[in-house]
Image (cartoon, grey):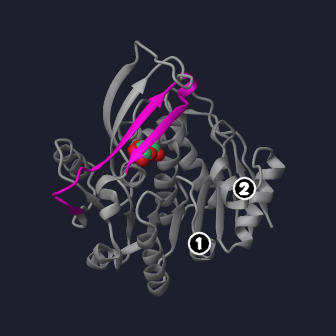
Amino acid sequence: MKNKIVVIGSSNVDLIMKMDRLPEKGETITDAGFFQVYGGKGANQAVGAARAGGKVAFVNCVGNDAYTPQMLENFRNDGLDIRFVFQETDIASGHALVMIGGEGNNYLSVAPGANYKLTPELIDRSIPVIDEAAMIIMQYEIPVETIKYVFRIAEAKDIPVMWNFAPARSFDLSYVAKTAILVVNETEAAFLCGQQVETDEEVELAAKKLQELGAKLVIITLGKRGAFALSATEKVAVPAFKVNAVDTTSAGDVFCGSFAVAQTEGKSLTDSLRFASTASAICVTRIGAQPSAPTRKEIDEFIGNNYVEKSHSIVI
Ligand code: RIB
């Protein structure tokens, strides 16, 4: 039976500096706190989904540096199926430099390293686990040709793809039509639509445009303002929980992983959005990408203990 969430994407070693405010251009900030954790959008989504209760396989390429053995050990400890995490010996794993300022805002710079060695040939070798997929999740930190190749395989095998178009950079927009669930933040939505996405009206307009490009379900995450979703039959706005944010770094990744779990469990669109928003809310109260992803118990308890503001759900 096809019951796995198969995440195909990146993994990184995150080197974090936490400071009271982000520096100006050319400025040096002293007294920062330093943390080394594990990240990468693909790995964060895989770990987020596994901790939220999903059966998850991760398809990725790591390198050969001092950090990599612990990265792989962490994947095993989170119960990920890593039979198709490949290892290259002549390159480092992906690395990210993360600067976190006040209110958890960040600057991020990524050196892809071995993530760019995840070629279509390695995807061919991963077909046994792709054949077990109830859903595939991708982001945009692996080679373009690999993403396109996976889209074509998924279409041929009739496997729904959740595509988190992050980080935003140019791509052949015809592939949006191959997306079952497109997840973007306001910046990524603006990049794809070529228009400003700030007000509620602009958010809805952008979602309509992305729907016209062929995405079956469009989700625009709005940070402190929650999330907006549009499908052929439903329009849902879910407010965010009010929490004390210290680091927003992997909030979008945790959202995607936990949303996939909720959908593959058969939850409604509104309940899936609430579940994912809760997981993100917990995530931003902690520092670091993978250390911040909440467990299923934490998500369920948070939902149980907190007043859930009414979501606006309209059947179209
Ligand atoms: O989305 C957050 C992630 O982006 C970080 O963990 C970093 O590694 C980059 O990939």
Report the number of numbered marks: 2
The x and y percentages for residue 104 are: 53, 28
Ligand 1's quadrant is top left
Residue 5, image quadrant: bottom left
Q: In this rendering, is residue 293 above or below 129?
A: above
Residue 178, image quadrant: bottom right
The label nearer to you, 2 versus 1, is 1
- Hey, what amino acid is under mark 1? Asp
Mark 1 neighbour class, 10 Å CA radius: few under 14, some 14 to 19, many 20 or more: few
Q: Residues in magenta?
A: 86-111
Image quadrant in which the C terminus is located:
bottom right
- The residue that mark 2 highlights is 236
Q: Is residue 58 visible?
A: no
Q: Could you tell me which residue is drawn at 54 percent across and 19 percent down? A: 21
Residue 1, image quadrant: bottom left
Q: Residue furthest right?
A: 201
The x and y percentages for residue 43 are: 36, 52
Which mark is on residue 305?
Answer: none
Q: Residue furthest front?
A: 26
